[in-house]
Amino acid sequence: MFVYLDNSATTKVAPEVVEIMAKTMTEDFGNPSSLHRMGLKAEKIMENARSLLASAIGASSDEIYFTSCGTESNTTAIRSAWNSMKRRGRRVITTLAEHSSVLRNVEYLERDSADAIYLPVKSDCSFDMDAFREALSEDTVLVSVMHANNEVGTIFPIAEIADELRTVAKDAILHTDAIQSFTKADCNVGRIKVDVMSLSGHKFHASKGVGALYIRRGLQLPALLLGGNQESGFRSGTENLPAIAGFGEAVRLAERAGAERVAHLAGVKDYLKGLILNNIADVRVNTPEDSLPSILNISFLGCRGEVLLHSLEAEGIYVSTGSACSSRSRGSHVLSAMGLSQEEIEGAIRFSFSEDNSLAQMDYVADKLRAAVMSQRKLRRTFSSRKA
Ligand code: PLP
């Protein structure tokens, strides 16, 4: 059986998305900046995608900028916001649980004299509002807090963060990385009250190579990429039309599937969690109750996540030990920010779901997982008693 449970790393491109991408590569392949008919057609396709995204997040089309990926969206948001604000104050606040594309950029700002605060998270990866209140100061110019965590699925209370922030530093910019939450949790920019929001296509069945940035109207951020003035001058470079057209289609599909898709994901996740808790001893569930429906992170004590990953792979099951981007470095910075022990960190597996997953698949996964855990624990016990 083939069971793909690494949808937070990337998703399969939807067939409808492939179709529209192929058409924009082979027929409607004009440059949106060209003045002739083919250019106008390309521009229309691009603007249609922009308006689909705008309407899905409660924004206007002129507040959406296409980028090449989530990393570019985060980089642009953080550096442009800092460039526009650094004369007014130096404090930048983020959390220890952010994706590396946020953390590395905040560190970059520190080298440009930012006074950065990396907020701790609680043991279930929930947001520490008291620590945030303490970190807030009048010279806070930028707050970058993710909407949902990519390793354990915790959702951060962005609207409350916005309210707290605005009582102390009303002009500060609030950025959120909604790359995992978009299409799985409410990303309406009015309701979550953000100024800037990052998105990435390949996390919701569009292709790789396309992301987007929402920037609230009225907020003037300086461009990082200069050149041909595409994207209203904010992000020069010929737009990746096929990927953008596909992004729009993937948004349309997600909107159409709506709450039903989210309920399906949550059902599959809860079912697998129940099977694991009922059939495998000595586990720690690292994902809290009120989390994204698409992510389940569990530590299997006495096991190495990486070895489990390969045992499952041999059975056609694809999971991850954490975020794809940090999987080659030692341990998870998110699990360690949650205060997990080295054993819990080493034994962690992230299962991430899509609408292609079924309950029958989860029965198969739980079966193979139990066998893999038992055999690894047995081997380790034999090995350590031999050593002793
Ligand atoms: N932010 C989060 C929360 C992510 O999960 C990811 C990807 O894993 C990124 C940013 C980076 O997105 P991209 O792979 O599109 O650069």
Image (cartoon, helix red, strand yellow):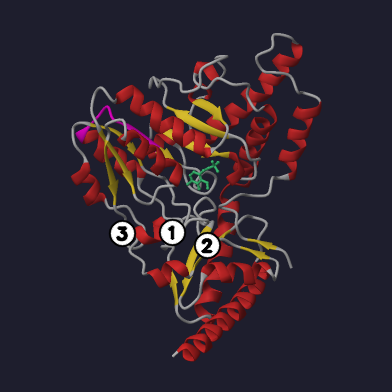
**Residues rendered magenta in the picture:** 168-175
Q: Name the residue under label 2.
A: 321
- For image coordinates 20% across by 35% down, the residue present is 168
Give the distance between the C-alpha atoms of the residues marked 2 and 1, in whole angstroms.
8 Å
Q: Is residue 180 left or right of residue 123?
A: right
Q: Mark 3 points at which residue?
A: 122
Q: Which of marks 2 and 1 is nearer the N terminus?
A: 2
Q: Which residue lies furthest to the front in this view?
A: 387
Give the distance between the C-alpha atoms of the residues marked 2 and 3, in whole angstroms.
21 Å
- For image coordinates 28% across by 30% down, the residue present is 172
Give the distance between the C-alpha atoms of the residues marked 3 and 1, in whole angstroms.
15 Å
Q: Which of 262 and 132 is in front in this view?
A: 132
Q: Quadrant of residue 20?
A: top right
Q: Characterize the local packing of mark 1: few (<14), some (14-19) or many (20 or more) Cα atoms within 10 angstroms.
A: many
Whether label 1 lies within 8 Å of ligand 1 gets the answer: no
Q: Mark 1 points at which residue?
A: 332
Which three-letter amino acid code belongs to the residue tagged 1? Ser
Please tell me the numbered disc located at residue 221. none
Q: Nearer the viewer, residue 257 or 202?
A: 202
Which three-letter amino acid code belongs to the residue tagged 2? Thr
Is 5 one of the magenta-colored residues?
no
Q: Which of 326 and 337 is in front in this view?
A: 326
Picture layout, residue 192 above or below residue 285: above
Marks 2, 3: nearer the viewer: 2
Which three-letter amino acid code belongs to the residue tagged 3? Lys
Q: Earlier in the sequence, mark 2 or mark 3?
A: 3
The reply to whether the C-beta atoms of the residues labelled 2 and 1 are less than 8 Å apart is yes
Picture layout, residue 235 above or below residue 372: above
User: Residue 55: where, in percent of width, then height?
Assistant: 54, 31
- For image coordinates 37% across by 36% down, the residue present is 108
Q: Earlier in the sequence, mark 3 or mark 1?
A: 3
